[in-house]
């Protein structure tokens, strides 16, 4: 019998140690973004723009043609929004099409698409219904297929991947009612029940694990057949213990989907609360060794995050189409809406930023397919940038549409107008700033990777647990590193007037690339100055770190749009227009970058901390008077997740 799980008590330092242990420690391959944060603009790593092979492109285009026909003829996005559910026949049709096996190797019955065409498919499907995009991406990007592809045994792949390719839906279960971005506090347990003597190796099969706990926000969990579950294995004789990943059959005794959650957007997704009570899972279903679960999850997300920008690209393209058509049809004060400068600026932003989102997504995806570079920072930047800018694009469309942007599509249709779901897109996109790492967490994650080179040589200097001898050694290493690195931040190609001349094609993009080169060095100097100033307190300066990362994101996007524009010109595909969009985006991005640099050192961070202390101590509680609180019903802020048998109806509904 398994012991009742207890909620672990974790200090801030222990939580950081768990997160640090789970991250990839080494850089075996070059990284464009890492170099960018270090003040080294390695354009050669992304230019010429990488391309899929002819075979991959043909296979991808053939599937896109079939998928387009399907979503145009079989998918009713308004129905999914209205009924908050994807019809079973649509899901069955997607299975028959092979859409659930897009990223699964052909030898397991999948389509074998690379990240580029997988994302194009998600963009297309998500434009018909964002809920379908989430269904497919949650299944393949973070569900069973991806971690098995990276870490599964040959036997596990043979057993589960053919099912995932055609018949079974999968989900990923990490979050708990009281555990979000801090997995060190994970309470779900997997207690070994070996059924005999201790195993000599943690990689051997035999025996079971017994799962107990509750998982929250299990996207696809309501309809899933297979689950990837993260649970804590207690340390014991023969067991290393730690957070561990398992493949779990949803029909196992003791699993109850207790609630189908509803949200402000993405109303068709099958997201629930899943309880495990004495659920037996064979040791053969463990992915990787004990204690490797969090590392498996984070590594999976390196490429898994690239699916989220695809939905933002879809939204951007649609917002641009609606903004163009509406602004041409609508007249104000004797001329089309688009002719008014205030509206025109919004349209320009939507067009230029959509071009940038597609450039960033395609570039990062192709880099993932090539596997020539380490893209952990690029993938995170793509997710961060797309989620933030996609939201702004949708918000600007709602503003352009005015009152009609606030009105639902059903209401517009009922009174005889075109049913444009602008408000729905705004609602649907809002979660992207939270999904798969909130913006705030992404800032910290990227910042940690961006300063990795510094911490690797000088980290012991600011570690309070290190001895004086360790600190002296770190000081010597840091001296050598900075003696070589700092002088290189003084001058570079960005100061030479004819650098990057191959990007001058009517419209001249070379000044923007010179700006990126100069600014990457300025960014590196600013990071170094921040570390010198705050040292061990640097990790608490989240405002500063967030702005550093946002500057890097803008520089990455500028690089991507210039490379994409030149690629399209070389391919003979709208090259002149692409150069114009790239120029507009870079001009807009440079203004944002300069503002961010100003806010590095001139901001209200210190004052904000004082205000927060006042708010939390009740100093400003008088400001809350004069209202009623409609949410105050006496219920707890966080639902009880005490382990035990479920007392609720099982709302799990497998689709067969």
Image (cartoon, rainbow, N blue to C red):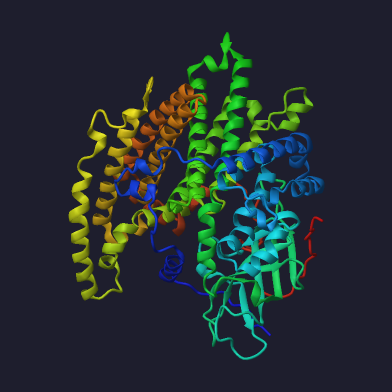
Number of numbered discs = 0
Question: Which quarter of the picture shows residue 49?
Answer: top left
Question: Which quarter of the picture shows residue 57?
Answer: top right
Relative depth, front residue between 134 and 415: 134
Q: Is residue 363 left or right of residue 421?
A: left
Vertical relation: 69 (above or below) 193: above
Percent x, y of residue 276: 69, 71
Relative depth, front residue between 554 and 421: 554
For the point 25% across and 37% down, which residue is it? 493
Percent x, y of residue 239: 55, 82
Vertical relation: 537 (above or below) 398: below
For the point 65% across and 48% down, which residue is it? 134
Locate the C terminus by quadrant. Answer: bottom right
Locate the N terminus by quadrant. Answer: bottom right
Vertical relation: 242 (above or below) 655: below
Percent x, y of residue 395: 56, 34
Vertical relation: 135 (above or below) 281: above
Relative depth, front residue between 2 and 476: 476
Note whether residue 145 is visible: yes
């Amino acid at each position: 019998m398994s012991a009742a799980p207890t909620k672990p008590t974790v200090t801030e330092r222990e939580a950081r140690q768990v997160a640090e242990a789970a991250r990839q420690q080494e850089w075996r391959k070059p990284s464009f973004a890492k170099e960018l944060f270090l003040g080294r603009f390695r354009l050669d790593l992304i230019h010429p723009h990488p391309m899929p092979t002819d075979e991959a492109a043909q296979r991808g285009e053939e599937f896109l043609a079939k998928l387009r026909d399907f979503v145009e003829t079989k998918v009713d996005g308004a129905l999914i929004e209205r009924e908050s559910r994807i019809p079973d026949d649509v899901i069955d049709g997607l299975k028959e099409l092979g859409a659930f096996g897009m990223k699964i190797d052909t030898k397991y019955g999948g389509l074998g698409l690379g990240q580029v065409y997988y994302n194009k498919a998600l963009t297309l499907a998500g434009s018909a219904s964002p809920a379908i995009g989430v269904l497919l991406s949650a299944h393949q990007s973070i569900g069973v297929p991806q971690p098995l592809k990276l870490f599964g045994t040959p036997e596990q792949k043979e057993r589960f991947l053919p099912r995932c390719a055609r018949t079974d839906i999968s989900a990923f279960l990490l979050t708990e009612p009281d555990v979000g971005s801090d997995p060190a506090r994970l309470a779900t347990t997997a207690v070994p029940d070996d059924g005999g003597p201790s195993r000599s190796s943690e990689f051997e099969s035999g025996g079971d694990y017994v799962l107990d706990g509750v998982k929250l926000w299990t996207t696809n969990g309501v309809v899933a057949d297979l689950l990837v579950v993260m649970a804590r294995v207690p340390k014991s004789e023969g067991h290393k213990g730690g957070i561990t990943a398992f493949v779990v059959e949803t029909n196992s005794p003791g699993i109850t989907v207790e609630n189908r959650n509803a949200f402000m957007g993405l109303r068709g997704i099958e997201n629930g609360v899943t309880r495990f009570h004495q659920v037996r899972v064979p040791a053969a279903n463990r992915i990787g060794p004990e204690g490797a679960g969090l590392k498996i999850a984070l590594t999976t997300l390196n490429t898994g995050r690239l699916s989220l920008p695809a939905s933002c690209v879809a939204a951007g393209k649609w917002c641009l189409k609606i903004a163009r058509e509406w602004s041409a049809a609508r007249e104000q004060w004797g001329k089309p809406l688009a002719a008014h400068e205030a509206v025109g600026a919004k349209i320009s932003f939507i067009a230029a930023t959509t071009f940038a989102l597609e450039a960033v997504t395609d570039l990062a995806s192709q880099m993932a397919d090539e596997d020539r570079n380490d893209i952990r920072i690029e993938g995170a930047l793509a997710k961060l940038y797309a989620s933030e800018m996609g939201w702004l694009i949708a918000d600007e469309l709602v503003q352009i549409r005015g009152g009609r942007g606030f009105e639902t599509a059903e209401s517009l249709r009922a009174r005889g107008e075109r049913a444009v779901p602008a408000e729905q897109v705004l609602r649907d996109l809002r979660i992207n700033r939270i999904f798969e790492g909130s913006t705030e967490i992404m800032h910290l994650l990227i910042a940690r990777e961006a300063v990795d080179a510094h911490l690797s040589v000088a980290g012991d200097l600011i570690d309070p647990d290190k001895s004086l001898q360790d600190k002296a050694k770190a000081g010597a290493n840091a001296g050598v590193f900075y003696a070589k690195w700092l002088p290189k931040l003084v001058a570079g190609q960005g100061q030479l007037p004819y650098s990057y001349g191959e990007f001058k094609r009517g419209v001249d993009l070379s000044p923007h690339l010179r700006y990126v080169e100069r600014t990457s060095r300025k960014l590196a100097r600013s990071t170094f100055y921040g570390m010198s100033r705050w040292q061990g307190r640097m990790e608490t300066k989240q405002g500063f770190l967030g702005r550093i990362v946002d500057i890097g994101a803008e520089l990455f996007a500028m690089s991507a749009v210039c490379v994409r524009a030149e690629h399209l010109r070389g391919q003979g595909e709208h090259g002149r227009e692409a150069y114009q969009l790239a120029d507009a985006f870079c001009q807009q991005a440079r203004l944002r970058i300069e503002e961010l640099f100003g806010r590095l050192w001139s901001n209200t961070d210190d004052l904000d901390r004082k205000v927060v202390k006042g708010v939390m101590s009740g100093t400003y509680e008088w400001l809350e008077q004069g209202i009623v609180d409609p949410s105050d019903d006496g219920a707890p802020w966080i639902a009880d997740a005490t382990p035990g048998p479920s007392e609720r109806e099982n709302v799990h509904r497998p689709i067969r």
